[in-house]
Amino acid sequence: MVSFVKLSKRAKITWVTLGTLVIALPTGLWTVNALTPSSVRQALPASASNVQEYYSDDGFHGDFVRCLQADMPQSEMPRFAAKLGLLQRYNAKRDAKLLLGFTTSDAISWWQLPTSLDGAYFECKPSSSSYSLAKYENGHVYFKAIAW
């Protein structure tokens, strides 16, 4: 094992610098990520209120679920969906075979399920096992994104 005492001053500085980066970089990235609003929250209009958001990931495989519920005017829904790239509209006859839904296995006390998917804006990527879905109902916007 190499002793720090036998290393040159330059080598010691290099090791201390690398050790600091190994600790500080992930900590800094986590802090920035925790303090930055999600892209979904940023897409909401300024008039949105009662915003509640849930996010969970497995931390390793890229699997995640994000749920957001907020009050907003119905007139803002097309713009909200467009900002998120949700350009398709759900039609039960055409899209029933897609694996889309608002249910979640995670217990979120505030999460309410829309009564149907009809008219929801969505983007589905079966090749990457993911989808994003947004629906306006009863004065609320419901958003769910999931990857598995």
Image (cartoon, helix red, strand yellow):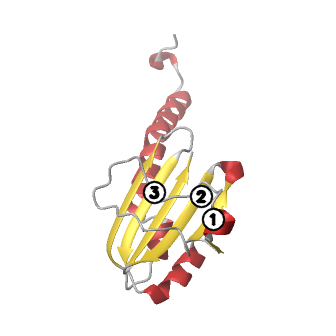
Q: CA distance from mark 1 to mark 2?
A: 6 Å
Amino acid type assigned to the residue bearing label 1 in the image: Glu
Going from N to C along the chain, the mark reached first, 1 or 3, is 3
Q: Is residue 137 above or below residue 36?
A: below
Numbered badge on residue 6: none
Q: Position of residue 12 (x, y in %)?
A: 50, 28
Name of the residue lying farthest toward the front: 93
User: Regarding mark 2 in the picture, which secondary structure is present there?
Assistant: strand
Amino acid type assigned to the residue bearing label 2 in the image: Tyr
The answer to whether the residue labelled 1 contacts the one labelled 2, judged by CB atoms less than 8 Å apart, is yes
In the rendered image, which residue does mark 1 sit on?
Answer: 123
Name of the residue lying farthest toward the right: 127
In the rendered image, which residue does mark 3 sit on?
Answer: 66
| Foreground pick, 29 / 111 | 111
- How many numbered discs sit on the rendered protein? 3
Give me the residue at 46% from left, 77% from top. Answer: 136
In the rendered image, which residue does mark 2 sit on?
Answer: 131
Going from N to C along the chain, the mark reached first, 2 or 3, is 3
Q: Residues within 10 Å of mark 3 (few under 14, many from 20)?
A: some
Amino acid type assigned to the residue bearing label 3 in the image: Arg
Q: Position of residue 147 (x, y in %)?
A: 56, 50
| Foreground pick, 72 / 83 | 72
Give me the residue at 57% from left, 58% from top. Answer: 100
The answer to whether the residue labelled 1 contacts the one labelled 3, judged by CB atoms less than 8 Å apart, is no
Q: Quadrant of residue 79?
A: bottom right
Going from N to C along the chain, the mark reached first, 1 or 2, is 1
Q: Position of residue 46 (x, y in %)?
A: 40, 84
Give me the residue at 42% from left, 60% from top. Answer: 67
Name of the residue lying farthest toward the bottom: 75
User: Regarding mark 3 in the picture, which secondary structure is present there?
Assistant: strand
Name of the residue lying farthest toward the top: 1
Q: Residues within 10 Å of mark 2 (few under 14, many from 20)?
A: many
